[in-house]
Amino acid sequence: MPLSMTETLAALEGGTLTARDHVEAVLDSAARHADLNAFITLDAEALRAAAAASDARRAQGKAGTLEGLALAIKDNIDTADLPTTGGTPALTGPAAADAPPLERLRAEGALVAGKSNLHELAFGITSNNAAFGPVKNPLDPAMIAGGSSGGTAAAIAAGIVPAGLGTDTGGSARVPAALCGIVGFRPTAGRYPKGGVVPLSPTRDTIGPMGRSVADVALLDAVMTQNSPELTRVPSNAIRLGVPRRVLWEGLEPAVAKRCEVALGRLAAAGVTLIESDPEDLWEDDASASFPIVLFETMRDLPVYCAARGISFDALMAGVASPDVRGILESQLGDGAMPEAAYRAAMEIHRPAMQRKWAAWFAQQDLHGALFPTTPLRARPIGGDETVTLNGAEEPTFATYIRNTDHGSVMGIPGISLPLPGDGLPVGLALDGVANGDRRLLSVAAALERLLQE
């Protein structure tokens, strides 16, 4: 079993592992798993040089919290020393500066193992990238890794790196975490310093830490927020969780339903209070807010980012290689563009209504979180970018995979996907919280992780 991030750090701190040896193991594993196509850029010599500098800092007693730890960084997160492509051909070369959250990780000694592959421009859920090739699922290379942070998820699940960063706009850290069997966390919107990410929707975009355990993502979260890394240990009989059956538990693949129901049984047997209850209807507001926010902000903010990188939006569009991504962007040109009135309604009416209803439900039921399957189905074969088969019917791929993660992204609340025990392709269990309750949610997630692994 590959080491988790916290286990790797313990070995580095204890002197049983050097950064140089850690990096060599990462490079060796990356070479052995090259067929997964988890990375777009991996500069071995630069990584070795960074490891040597890290070992020197440790020898001088100047080690940071993450000293010598190699992380996979999704290739839509700006790096000043490695190319930031966004998974699209027109974006080449390094950005002007590291993304601010990455700056904080590097300041504590973290190393960038490489830039991980993703769905082109992060505008999809399969990571089947026509420009750089598809990311393959380590559990079954014929299957998708999920997206858009598929490369980071695959690299962690394969044991290439212990942890890394993805991004999440509609589920892009949590969905691949679920499909690859790791932990993926979406923080409250605005929790980490803004900027430094190829934008889809600044309202909804956030960097999302990913790892092999809740402790991994909690430590990355602490460093990026410059807060204490300690989590409160929560006894199982003090935890109250909502189980919102409407929509989120409907129409599941049988294997997903079974594993998630078994998980509920184990939690209840351990003393967790499960409350079968739904918030006031969110779904009409979600439908009216979701795409208007993303599409309007993409066409407003992506050209600005391109200009700062020295290319035109026309040049970006000319290079888009993935048919699904090209189709989305072209639909927003000319008369087909999302009307500003729909965007204003989403931001001023529908999104606030969802936030009020969700917060009121948590308060009324005195909840620590809401539990539901991260995705209605497990990984499907690479190539099904338009439709997937679910319970005998052909369903739209993108909408089906983000069905259970989109509402949280629209509201800007924290959410985490935990891997469930079981054979076969992985299944994720989602735990959502309330805005700015990130550390409380992570503490509860750590308790659930212990209970589900016992």
Image (spheres, grey):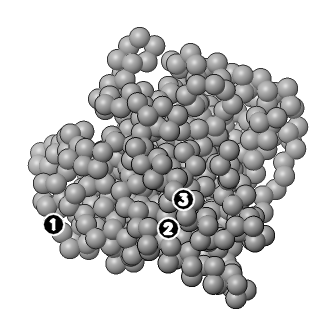
Disc 3 marks a residue whose amino acid type is Val
Q: Secondary structure at mark 2?
A: strand
Which disc is residue 194 wearing?
none
Which disc is residue 312 wearing?
1
State which mark lies toward you, 1 or 2: 2
Q: Name the residue tied to disc 2.
A: 112
Q: Report which quarter residue 383 is drawn in.
A: top left
**Disc 1 or 2, which lies upstream in sequence?**
2
User: Is 368 on the left-hand or right-hand side of 338?
Assistant: right
Q: How far apart, in angstroms, are the residues tagged by discs 3 and 1?
A: 36 Å
State which mark lies toward you, 3 or 1: 3
**Dot 2: few (<14), some (14–19), or many (≥20) neighbours within 10 Å?**
many
Q: How far apart, in angstroms, are the residues tagged by discs 2 and 3?
A: 11 Å
Asked if the residue under mark 3 is in contact with the one under mark 2, i.e. CB atoms within 8 Å, the reply is: no
Q: Is residue 336 above or below residue 259?
A: below
**Disc 3 or 1, which lies upstream in sequence?**
3
The answer to whether residue 450 shows anywhere in this view is yes
Which quadrant would the N terminus be assigned to in this image? top right
Task: Give percent across and percent down for residue 361.
Answer: 66, 38
Q: Nearer the viewer, residue 89 or 330?
A: 89
Task: Give percent across and percent down for residue 386.
Answer: 29, 29
Task: Give percent across and percent down for residue 335.
Answer: 12, 45
| Residue depicted at 39% across the width and 76% down the height | 80
Disc 1 marks a residue whose amino acid type is Ser
Q: Name the residue tied to disc 3.
A: 26
Q: Report which quarter residue 370 is drawn in.
A: top right
Q: Nearer the viewer, residue 5 or 170?
A: 5
